[in-house]
Structure formats: structure tokens, C-alpha cells
Amino acid sequence: MTAIDSTAERSTRAHQYLQEGRGDLAIPLFEEELAHRRKALGPDHPDTLTAQSNLATAYQAAGALDEAITLYGGALALSREALGQAHPDTLATQSNLATAYLDAGRLDEATTLLEGTLAKRRATLGPTDPDTVASQGLLATAYLDAGRLGEATALLEDTLAQHRALLGPAHPDTLTSQSILADAYLEAGRLDEATALLEDALAQHRALLGHAYPGTLTVQANLANAYRKAGRLGEAIPLYEE
């Protein structure tokens, strides 16, 4: 087996571990891949930077946020210098670093990066590109976490509309946007709008994924909470019990 074959196989196994939620097993494989790429290609080659971001993702999945942030930050600096600030790979790394900041509760830093990413993607890709819409949803989540409810709600409403148009009403990304918007409505006391969104999301989840799927149960619990806040205990209690 050649070194290239070995590296490709190692990378494939590492990604499989990530998909299975086993970031701790992916880390040593991605570390080997990064070391190989740095030696063979140099520290700022696009493939090396991808390997560095992959390792950061594994650390993030394993809850090692300091290590993930350090790796993402290094990859972002190199990518900006080698590829430019508006390159798709640079913006992907910038977005990944922002998600690590969100996980670490560093909302100001996350928001700054996400605002920059969204602005550049809107300028280069347009407002309806899937990557632009994904950036918009992430920024809305950051605003929501920071208590910036009005800004979050406006972005979430547009994100949901874009997802419905691009992906259809039953796509997982659409349903995620719908549930997050419902959370924003709940925080704002807009109970009727939140309930309508959650009722529809629950019906879609049950039809697509079944009644016992974890995501379905999360939406069901959120709907029960909305019913409770609205004083509709007769509807909330059976959902909680189930």
C-alpha cells in the first residue's frame, strides 16, 4: 500500500468515526494525516489546511474546545494568507471557528466571525446560495444565544423561507430552521406562531423519521412546552407523558 493509499484510508476511517460521534477515535487518525500532509505538502497547502480543520472538528466533537479553537484559528490565518479572505475554503474555516466559539460560550467572537462570513458569502455567492443561507442560520443562532431576539427572529424567518424554497418543507435543514424559529417566537411570547410551527414540524418529523426518533421527541417536548406556556395543559400533558 502506498503512502497516499494509507493516508486516504486513514482519513476515511476518521470521518466514519466522526459520523458515529466517536471523535476520540478520530483524533489520532487525523493527527497522523495532518503530520503527513505537513511533511509532504507544507503547512499552507490547501490539503494540509483541510487536514488541520478535520482534526479541529474531531477535537470539537470530543469536547476539547481549546484544542479545536487553536487549530481552527491557525488554519484560518494560513488560509487567509494563502487563499484570500473571501475564498470558499477560508470562509468555511472561519465558520467552523465560529461554531467552536459558540460551543465555548464566546458569543462576541463567534458573532463577529459569523457576521463577516455572511457578508462575504452574500457578496460572492448571493443571498440564496445554500452556503449563504447556512451562514445566516448560524448567525441567527448566535444572536439568539446573545439575547438579540429581534435580530435573530428576522434572520430566522428569512432562513426558513429560503430553506423551504431551496429544499422543500420536509427537508431536515428546513425542519431545524422551523424549530429554531419557534424557539425564538416562544422567547418573544408569540405563542400562537410558535405552536403552529412546532405542530407542523412534529407532523413532518413523525412522517419522515417515526415517533421514537430522538429529533422527533425533541420537537414533541418543545411543543408540549409551548402548550404549557399557553395554558393548554390538556394538550401538553399527554405529549410530556409520551
Image (cartoon, grey):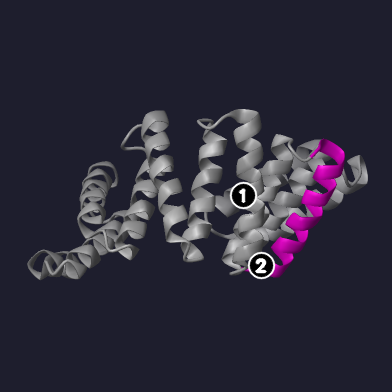
Q: Nearer the viewer, residue 239 or 26?
A: 239
Q: Quadrant of the C terminus?
A: bottom left
Q: Amino acid at mark 2?
A: Leu
Dot in front, 2 or 1: 1
Position of 95 with respect to 241 (left or right) is right
The 10 Å Cα crowd at callout 1, few under 14, some 14 to 19, many 20 or more, is: some
Q: Residue at x 49, y 47 (%)?
A: 137
What number of labels is visible?
2
Q: Which mark is residue 115?
A: 1
Q: Is residue 130 visible?
A: yes
Mark 1: amino acid? Glu
Alpha-carbon span between mark 2 and mark 1:
21 Å
In the figure, 152 relative to 160: above or below?
below
- The residue at the point 56 percent across, 37 percent down is 132
Camera-side residue: 13 or 228?
Answer: 228
Q: Please identify the dominant SS of the magenta region.
A: helix
Q: Secondary structure at mark 2?
A: helix
Q: Residues within 10 Å of mark 2 (few under 14, many from 20)?
A: some
Left or right relative to 93: residue 143: left
Q: Which mark is residue 65?
A: 2
- From what the image shows, is residue 8 above or below residue 110? above
Using the rendered view, name the quadrant where residue 74 is placed: bottom right
Magenta segment range? 63-84
| Quadrant of the rendered image containing residue 190 | bottom left
Instruction: Name the quarter where the N terminus is drawn.
Output: top right
| Tag 2 near tag 1, CB within 8 Å | no
